[in-house]
Image: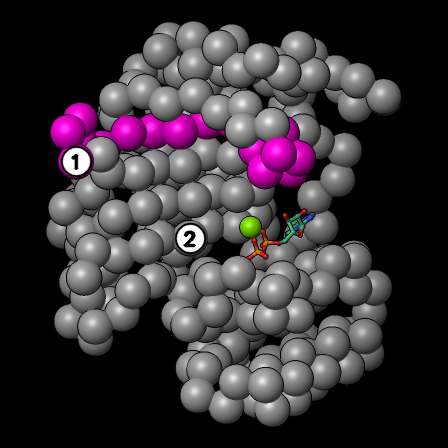
Amino acid sequence: MKEARIPDILARAVREGRSFLSLSESLEVLRAYDLPVANYTVIRSLDDISAAGKVGYPLVLKLDSPDIVHKTEFGGVKVGIQSPEELRKSMEDMLSRVRSASPNVRLTGFVVQELVRNAHEVIIGGLNDAQFGPLIVFGLGGIFVEILKDVVFDLAPVSVEEALEMIKKIKGYRLLEGYRGLEKASFELLAETISKASFMFSELSPYVEEMDLNPTFVSSSWVKIVDARFKLRT
Ligand code: ADP
Ligand code: MG
């Protein structure tokens, strides 16, 4: 089963003395645990641009590197690319910017991802508490987390029912019922995702210090994780 495989990805990264998984490795871990990730493909060189056709335009381009965890700060995310020409240009721009600003950063390629729209933005996280062990974290995305600190914690793992309780504890949870033309988020699918993520995190917590699935998009009929960060124990 996957238990044997996933620690392999992590064990290799730990052996290499790495502090983080790259985005493509992180998405691979999520997929192995059957978590819903937005459609994506990994492009290792500018020669492989045609592979982006599988994802479809418009799309999102992200730098893939074990050394870059806050991609936006590095100019490593471009949202809404419309054509293969624009994709090539954006890749070249990203490469030259990173190469000149941070020549020592390891670049393993790019992640090309479907552009997700018309959905609620939430975060799911995991952290290890010295006293309580692995915890699962849930909150609304964007300013709700950054400024209002509207998040809830529970001991991991949580069942789907416990995850539903977590969702309802968020102060802003009524926003998930829909606002400004945004339809209601599926609480069931979201709770299922939080629960699955919590089981994954408890299993990986011997290797993983922190997990951040931010953002995770939720609509009335699907959940799509577009970013994932795993901080390894070193
Ligand atoms: P990082 O957090 O490392 O800067 P993200 O992958 O989270 O990079 O991307 C930054 C922001 O871009 C996200 O918070 C989100 O608002 C937007 N974004 C990223 N990927 C997508 C996507 N596939 N569809 C729509 N918006 C996206
Ligand atoms: Mg992010």
Residue at 57% from the left image edge and 42% from the top image edge: 215
Q: How is the image coloured?
A: one colour
Q: Where does the image place residue 26, in percent across and percent down from the top left?
A: 39, 55
Above-or-below relation of 195 to 17:
above
Q: Which image quadrant is residue 9 in? A: bottom left
Identify the secondary structure beneath mark 1: loop
Q: Is residue 11 left or right of residue 28?
A: left
Disc 1 versus disc 2: nearer the observer: 1
Identify the secondary structure beneath mark 2: strand
Determine the residue located farthest toward the front in the rendered image. 147
For the residues marked 1 and 2, what is the alpha-carbon distance in whole angstroms? 21 Å
Q: Earlier in the sequence, mark 1 or mark 2?
A: 1
- Range of residues picked out in magenta: 130-147
Q: Where does the image place residue 20, in percent across and percent down from the top left?
A: 34, 62
Q: Is ligand 2 closer than 8 angstroms to the Cβ of mark 2?
A: yes
Residue located beneath label 1 in the image: 130
Residue kind at label 2, given as amino acid type: Arg
Q: Is residue 142 magenta?
A: yes
Residue kind at label 1, given as amino acid type: Ala
Q: Is residue 199 left or right of residue 225?
A: left
Q: Which image quadrant is residue 182 in? A: top right
Residue located beneath label 2 in the image: 229
Residue at 43% from the left image edge and 14% from the top image edge: 166
Is 81 or 177 nearer to us in this picture? Answer: 177
